Image (spheres, rainbow, N blue to C red):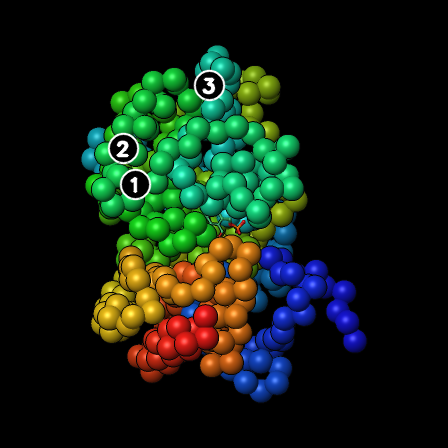
Amino acid sequence: MTSPVWHPFTQHGLNEPIPQVVRADGALLHLADGGTLIDAISSWWVTTHGHCHPRIAAAIAQQAATLDQLIFAGYTHAPAEEVARGLIALAPRAPGQPELAHVFYSDSGSTAVEVAIKMALGYWYNLGQPERHRILVLEHGYHGDTIGTMSIGERGVYNAAWTPLLFDVGTIPFPAPGAEQACLDALESACRDKPAAFIVEPLILGAGGMLIYPASVLREMAAICRRHDVLFIADEVMTGWGRTGTLFACEQAGIVPDIMAVAKGITGGAIPLAATLATAPIFDAHRSTDRARLFYHSSSYTANAIACAAAVANIAIWQEEDVLGRIAALSAGIAARLGTLASHRAFANPRQLGTIAAIDLMTGDAGYLSDLAPRLRAFFLDKGLLLRPLGNTIYMMPPYCTDAAQLDRLFTAIAQAGDYFSANA
Ligand code: PLP
């Protein structure tokens, strides 16, 4: 029987297998056919502590039976208030920099970033400078799949059909090793034209290929924006909630962005929720007795109470348990094993930031439309692993509960992929 389901980022014409998952716990997915998979990419980078975490599952069940959903324009509820206070308490801080002080809810990383862009333009508009609407972005960036977030992301085959709808941005070259100063100079020069904002994925570009750049460059980017009065937006949708070794990546650079987008791991990865945090000046630019200045954005499920309860439980886990200790142990386990892959002749450019590791397979056609990534996917599926390479970049971003035996299986399979694909390119 053919399924009516249209899957995301899936070419149904290729008839690739679509395994059915019936249950999950920890780092494991249990399949309908009785098999199991290690979820080595945290189900698209969302699952942090592990699947079906008992504290988060219990909070969801309890909230679902108490208050499920509430219109959030003009009404509020305790879980949303608690998450907002928790986010403000956990957000990056630095001496002498304005604090993130306000929390606007939405439902996905894309909407959190859309809200960030709208806040930035709303800020300048309400300050009487509507001509400041240009957004600066980093080359190879990814911020989502809505029209606005595609506009500020890398252009390619994945958004070609919608090019006529995408707005113009200023692209700053990626600070690759040796090109850091060129990147900073380009940013400084672009800032002189008084754009509205500069948006970055802090420390690591995810979908762009797990491209890492130094905290010192991130710090300097923020400083340049501050010098030129350009809003600095950090998209922590992927990097947030511990992936890079700290709760938020911005902490490693000692910076506080003007606007910060978070999603994915905000509920531990159990249920959709997103938030856009802003400093007082951004909020104050919209606060007035004039209704025309309010922030015109909402969606039906803004601050859904069940999702907020999951986020309350997640924040409690962060505050009460040694999550950073688990992350440090996992990062060390990955580092020890990544070293062994580095000497494999099929691989190049091993890299790691916290619990994220990547390596490039130097064989065959690596283009986005080549069949290398799907062949790799199938190879790993056969070995009981959920991995989803980006072109020829094999990366992992496992949940923090992943154990040593699971890491061993993961790295053994990647080494085997190196052997197999260099013999069968
Ligand atoms: N921003 C970044 C950095 C991301 O990696 C992603 C998704 O991977 C998004 C935004 C979009 O998030 P979502 O898929 O929840 O809309």
**Dot 1 or dot 2, earlier in sequence:** 1
Disc 3 vs disc 2: which is toward the camera? Answer: 2
Callout 1 amino acid: Pro
Q: Earlier in the sequence, mark 1 or mark 3?
A: 3
User: Could you say where residue 93 lies in the image, as x and y percent from the top left?
Assistant: 27, 40
Say whether residue 312 is visible.
no
Mark 2 lies on residue? 182
Which is more toward the observer, 278 or 173?
A: 173
- Residue marked by disc 3: 132
Circle 1 or circle 3, nearest the eye: 1
Q: Is residue 205 left or right of residue 215?
A: right
Pick the front one: 106 or 8: 8
Which is nearer the eye, 334 or 284?
334
Which residue position is annotated with label 1? 175
Q: Give me the disc on residue 189.
A: none
Residue 360 occupies quadrant: bottom left
- Location of the N terminus by quadrant is bottom right
Answer few, some or many: residues within 10 Å of disc 1's Cα (few below 14, many 20 plus, some between 14 and 19).
many
Q: Position of residue 417 (x, y in %)?
A: 41, 75
Location of residue 255 in the rendering, given as x and y in whole percent from the top left corner: 27, 38
Number of other residues with Cα within 10 Å of mark 2, as a class: few under 14, some 14 to 19, many 20 or more: some
Q: Are marks 3 and 2 in contact (CB under 8 Å)?
A: no
Q: Residue at x 59, y 33 (%)?
A: 166
Disc 3 is placed on an element classified as loop
Q: Do the residues under discs 1 and 2 have CB atoms within 8 angstroms?
A: yes
Q: Residue furthest top?
A: 128
> What whole-number distance in Å separates the C-alpha atoms at marks 1 and 2?
7 Å
